[in-house]
Image (tube, rainbow, N blue to C red):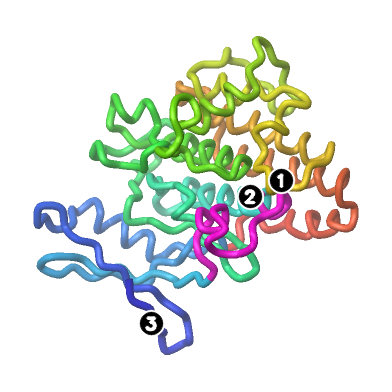
Amino acid sequence: MYRGKLKDGSQIAVKCVRKLNGQNLTAELWRELETLEKIEHRNLARLFGFFERTADSLVVVEYVSNGSLREHLDESCGNGLELAQRLNIAIDVAQGITYLHEYKEHPVIHGGIRSSSVLLTDALTAKVAGFGLAGTAASGSGSGSGSDATPAKGAAGYVDPEYLSTYQLTDKSDVYAFGVLLVELVTGRPPIERSRGGEARLTTRWVRKETNNPRIAYVSAELRCSQPCRGRAMQALQRCRAGEAVVAMDPRMRRSPASVAAVERTLALAAQCVATARDDRPSMRRCSELLWAIRRDYHRQDEPRCAAVAEERSDEWFVR
């Protein structure tokens, strides 16, 4: 990657993308990149341009100075993140992806959501990057629409189970990856940890083991799911009933009744996002709404001095 500066002072990053088997960009990908060039949102790393060469392609994107979310969770960048900051980041990501899914000219599926593609500014505003992996939705196709993709689409631990059998990327594939990201934010652990053995290797299964409980009730009526839980990840997260979410929390985060309640609700939302069946997952807009409510209540219960901050951010839904 190379850094540069435009005439207007904008900081940019120039990334070299090698071609697979020397193949040129497809017409679909050209259209997608042309669409992404037009998109501007405070929670999306802007794409300034792209150029195709014989052996590779160059992509020019906004440079975001403060590293990735994964680096902050690993504390290789920054000093760690408190729960309030993690909720802010989750909302930022949800808003950015919602904007892509609802983009009026040509809805866009990201297809590569993961903690390393979430970049942070010095103010810890999240900007979603990694659009080289994105897929475009069919025009006017709605929530269930998708585009053909290759088996390599997505990152290990974030891949929609239905995609593995259909190779159809949809907006609900992004929702699934976002659910995994929520678990990552809460636990501080990546989806897969090869250094660990057994159940602990997969973070969602580890959550299930540590909070093992045969029956649970949803902690909030607003997060109630009408469908029975399906899939290991969903069952694992739903087992974080009242008082047990503290086991799954990143030990670096401050514990309080309000923070544990916020984590419970976040994990309940994550459980819906990683439902095996796509139709059981919420939309990204719904994720944004629920996360904003979780943050608002957390600030009011645990940090009254921050309530004003939560209210100020309530009008930031779709800054263009």
The numbered disc on residue 236 is: none
Amino acid type of the residue that numbered disc 2 sits on in the rendered structure:
Ile
The answer to whether residue 75 is magenta is yes
For marks 1 and 2 on the same chain, the one whose residue lies earlier in the sequence: 2
**Distance of mark 2 from mark 3, alpha carbons?**
29 Å
Question: Callout 1, which amino acid?
Answer: Trp
**First along the sequence among labels 2 and 3:** 3
At 47% from the left edge and 87% from the top edge, which residue is drawn? 8
Residue segment shown in magenta: 66-86
Q: Name the mark nearer the viewer: 1 or 3.
A: 3
Which label number is shown at residue 91? 2
Secondary structure beneath dot 3 equals: strand
Q: Taking 171 as reference, is 237 above or below it?
A: above
- For marks 1 and 2, give the CA distance: 7 Å
Look at mark 3 in the image and give the residue it sits on. 4
Residue 92 sits in quarter: bottom right
Q: Position of residue 319 (x, y in %)?
A: 61, 61
Q: Give x and y (percent) for residue 290.
A: 69, 38
- Residue 158 appearing in the image: no
Front label number (2 vs 3)? 3
Relative to 197, does residue 316 appear above or below in the rendering? below
Question: Can residue 299 be seen in this snapshot?
Answer: yes
Query: Disc 3 residue type?
Result: Gly
Left or right: 123, with 35 as reference point:
right
Pointer 1 with pointer 2, Cβ within 8 A: yes
Magenta stretch contains residue 317: no
Q: Which residue is tagged 1?
A: 292
Q: Quadrant of the N terminus?
A: bottom left
Question: Is 232 left or right of 271, judged from the image as shown?
Answer: left
